[in-house]
């Protein structure tokens, strides 16, 4: 064709115009719209638009669209649809809302509108409320909206803006719900595969529901959005999320100044959208009560496919500092994989825990399979544990632990529990321990230990020194924050020379008060049963002991309690004694209460009352006052029965009714024993048995003997003055016999013969 010939050119245009009827109609329609814009109102409002949109959404998605406000169309500067009071339901669930909004502006592609197939390019939504759900298989409840290709409006978004948005995000895989408040979200350049941008700013809240929120903070997030059409993969690259706490948390959390930072990349498959992997590094810090927490977690590789989540090469470190101590914990896991049921598992987790304070140190190393249930419950189904424990009351070495068992940790409900068996200090050991509330922990324990010898760990003592320093303050630091209940059984407890067998008790420790009730043990060959109460709330601690001791080895008991070996035998004791102070000398000085003693088949060591009475019997006629030596550590006085009741007050024991039955004589006693001063002033009245020939001279007399001086080595003194008075009274009251005449001598008479 000769385009230089005008006639040919005019002919071609005429043919194109004649045969391009569709193009002609579009062009005339466009010119008509432009002309109408100048003479009609800028906004066109019509109810038919509501019906059209609702029918299109329902046909394409199965969702119900409600528009309770106005529906308007804007022609310039760009075609748009403006809707007010809009709600969109879940698919095929008209009564269950997915999204609400005060207003929605949908901008359309101009040329697609002219072609009769409108294409959605931008969305601006004001005050929306979204309820987003991520199912256990990784799908979202908005997947259908990303692949709408029905007969209505087509979606080809380039930008989306949410202003003052509220979101409820529920994750069925991890069983968590997150609430946000007043968020501004922008997604830009979505149609550009290399320049997409994500920005989020606003508030976020956490709680059981919208009305019971326990934490509030500010959220800021940025990321690049990269889309590969060939791989149909959307990458949220260079993701940076910062969350900072605002104000105080709920009292149950006691959390303040909390910060969380997330760095990494997230990958999604497209149409439908599925999370398929990524990598993250999460750091967090904050103060809870008086505890400063800091943690880091590295997950360099995340994979999610076919309902299976796998986290590779996890490293977690947690540190806590507080005035009362420090905690350092670490976790290393090669791969943690999970299923659609929300269970993540690894066969080889390594956990290190170190707890230290000025008073104690605990180091533990776990190796175990590990399970994570619903992202907040951690289980150790078969762990092995090695560790050691020290405290300042046991300064010489560490107590070794070698255990195996099961454990669980519930982060949401703040509970922890272990059930294990093994060895503690090389002795068989089993225990169940549970903890509730990590800020103010409450313990429940059930412990059974075959043998524990604390002697190697106790402070060293020199040869011949007393096992207990009377003036050394007791250390009750372990009661400061203890809140525990439970039961303890120890087959044999060794404290230097003291052996306690079959020790068992129920314990309750709370508010700096310890109660062991009932408390029982095999002690000094006998059986102990009763209760003990220790209260350290006041500047001076108070203790009350209520015990019954039966068939006790008296000599060993008094040697340890009173540092005296003056009694032998077995007997029974009933004690109800209370004292205050922070050292043994204080307890001895302030002790008050009642003590009842009943001994049988025993002896009083250091004195032989029978030998003394024999000497006094020989001297009774002259009463020359010659001193009788009573104190002799190699001597003893045997008895068949001894009974006495003591009343304690301010560390002084008073007795008025001691009775001792020694067969050939009886003893009665009364006096005081001052435990604080370590002195005694006691009077023993000895009454000989008149039927014993070698004591016949003491018939009707009571021999008073004073016991004076240190409790551990008293001196014995016979009260001769009292004895003389008794002899003189006996002589004065005796009847005078008349003198008899001497008979005359007579011849001897033969002896009588015995009868036959």
Image (cartoon, grey):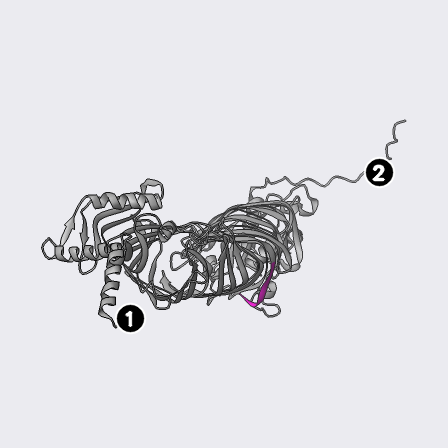
Residue 302 on image: x %, y %? 48, 62
Residue 271 on image: x %, y %? 41, 55
Image quarter hosting the N terminus: bottom left
Q: Nearer the viewer, residue 610 or 306?
A: 306
Residue 642 on image: x %, y %? 59, 45
The crowd level at tag 2 (other Cα within 10 Å; few <14, some 14-19, many 20+) is few
Mark number, residue 748: 2
Q: Which residue is rendered at x = 40% and y = 57% of the image?
A: 439
Q: Residue furthest top?
A: 756
- Total numbered labels: 2
Q: Nearer the viewer, residue 391 or 314?
A: 314
Residue 507 in sight from this viewpoint: yes
Q: Main secondary structure of the magenta part?
A: strand
Residue 545 in sight from this viewpoint: no
Alpha-carbon span between mark 1 and mark 2: 202 Å
**Label 1 belongs to which residue?**
2
Q: Residue furthest left?
A: 39
Image quarter hosting the C terminus: top right
**Vertical side of 583 occupied by 412: above or below:** above
Residue 428 placement, left or right of 287 = right
Name the image quarter holding residue 297. bottom left
Q: Of label 1 and label 2, which has the lower sequence position?
A: 1
Residue 229 on image: x %, y %? 42, 62
Q: Secondary structure at mark 1?
A: loop
Residue extent of the magenta highlight: 394-402
User: Is 400 part of what is drawn in magenta?
Assistant: yes
Q: Which residue is rendered at x = 26% and y = 46% of the image?
A: 53
């Amino acid at each position: 064709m000769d385009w230089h010939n005008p006639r040919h050119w005019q002919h071609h245009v005429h043919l194109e115009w004649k045969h391009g009827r569709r193009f002609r109609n579009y062009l005339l329609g466009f010119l008509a719209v432009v002309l109408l814009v100048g003479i009609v109102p800028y906004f066109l409002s019509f109810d038919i638009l509501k019906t059209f949109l609702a029918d299109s959404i329902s046909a394409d998605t199965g969702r119900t669209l409600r528009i309770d406000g106005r529906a308007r169309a804007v022609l310039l500067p760009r075609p748009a649809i403006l809707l007010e009071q809009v709600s969109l339901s879940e698919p095929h669930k008209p009564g269950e809302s997915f999204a609400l909004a005060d207003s929605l502006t949908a901008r359309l592609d101009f040329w697609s509108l002219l072609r009769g197939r409108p294409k959605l390019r931008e969305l601006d939504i004001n005050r929306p409320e979204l309820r987003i759900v991520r199912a256990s298989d990784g799908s979202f409840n908005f997947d259908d909206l990303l692949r709408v290709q029905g007969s209505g409006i087509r979606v080809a978004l380039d930008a989306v803006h949410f202003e003052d948005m509220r979101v409820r995000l529920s994750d069925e895989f991890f069983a968590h719900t997150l609430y946000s408040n007043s968020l501004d979200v922008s997604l830009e350049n979505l149609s550009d595969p290399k320049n997409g941008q994500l920005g989020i700013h606003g508030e976020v809240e956490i709680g059981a529901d919208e009305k019971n929120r326990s934490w509030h903070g500010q959220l800021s997030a940025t990321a690049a959005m990269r889309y590969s059409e060939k791989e149909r993969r959307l990458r949220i690259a260079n993701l940076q999320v910062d969350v900072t706490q605002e104000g105080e948390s709920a009292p149950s959390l006691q959390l303040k100044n909390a910060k969380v930072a997330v760095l990494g990349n997230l990958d999604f498959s497209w149409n439908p959208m599925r999370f398929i992997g990524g990598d993250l590094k999460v750091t967090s810090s904050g103060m809870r009560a008086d505890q400063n927490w800091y943690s880091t977690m590295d997950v360099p590789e995340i994979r999610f496919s076919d309902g299976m989540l796998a986290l590779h090469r996890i490293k977690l470190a947690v540190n806590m500092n507080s005035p009362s101590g420090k905690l350092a914990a670490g976790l290393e896991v090669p791969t943690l994989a999970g299923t659609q049921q929300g269970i993540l598992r690894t066969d080889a987790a390594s956990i290190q825990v170190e707890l230290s304070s000025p008073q104690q140190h605990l180091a533990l190393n776990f190796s175990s399979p590990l399970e994570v249930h619903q992202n907040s419950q951690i289980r150790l189904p078969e762990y092995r544990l090695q560790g050691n424990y020290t405290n300042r009351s046991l300064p010489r070495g560490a107590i070794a632990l070698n255990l195996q068992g099961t454990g669980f940790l519930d982060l949401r409900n703040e509970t922890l529990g272990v059930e294990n068996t093994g060895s503690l200090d090389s002795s068989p050991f089993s225990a169940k321990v549970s903890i509730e509330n990590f800020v103010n922990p409450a313990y429940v324990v059930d412990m059974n230990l075959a043998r524990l010898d604390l002697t190697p760990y106790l402070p060293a003592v020199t040869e011949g020194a007393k096992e207990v320093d009377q003036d050394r303050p007791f250390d009750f630091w372990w009661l400061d924050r203890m809140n525990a209940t439970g039961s303890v059984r120890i087959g044999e407890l060794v404290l230097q020379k003291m052996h306690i067998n079959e020790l068992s008790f129920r314990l309750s420790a709370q508010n700096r008060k310890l109660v062991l009730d009932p408390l029982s043990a095999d002690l000094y060959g006998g059986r102990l049963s009763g209760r003990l109460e220790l209260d350290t709330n006041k500047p001076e601690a108070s203790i009350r002991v209520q015990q019954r001791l039966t068939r006790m080895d008296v000599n060993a008991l008094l040697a340890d309690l009173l540092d005296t070996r003056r009694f032998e035998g077995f007997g029974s004791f009933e004690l109800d004694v209370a004292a205050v102070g922070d050292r043994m000398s204080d307890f001895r000085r302030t002790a008050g209460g009642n003590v009842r003693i009943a001994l049988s088949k025993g002896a009083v060591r250091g004195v032989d009352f029978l030998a003394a009475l024999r000497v006094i019997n020989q001297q009774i006629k002259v009463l020359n006052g010659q001193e009788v030596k009573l104190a002799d550590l190699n001597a003893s006085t045997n008895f068949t029965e001894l009974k006495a009741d003591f009343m304690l007050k301010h560390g002084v024991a008073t007795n008025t009714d001691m009775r001792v039955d020694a067969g050939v004589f009886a003893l009665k006693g009364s006096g005081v024993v001052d435990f604080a001063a370590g002195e005694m002033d006691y009077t023993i009245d000895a009454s000989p048995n008149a039927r014993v020939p070698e004591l016949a001279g003491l018939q009707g007399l009571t021999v008073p003997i004073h016991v004076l001086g240190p409790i551990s080595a008293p001196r014995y003194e016979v009260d001769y003055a009292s004895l003389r008075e008794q002899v003189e009274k006996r002589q004065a009251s005796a009847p005078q016999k008349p003198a008899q005449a001497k008979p005359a001598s007579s011849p001897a008479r033969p002896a009588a013969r015995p009868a036959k």
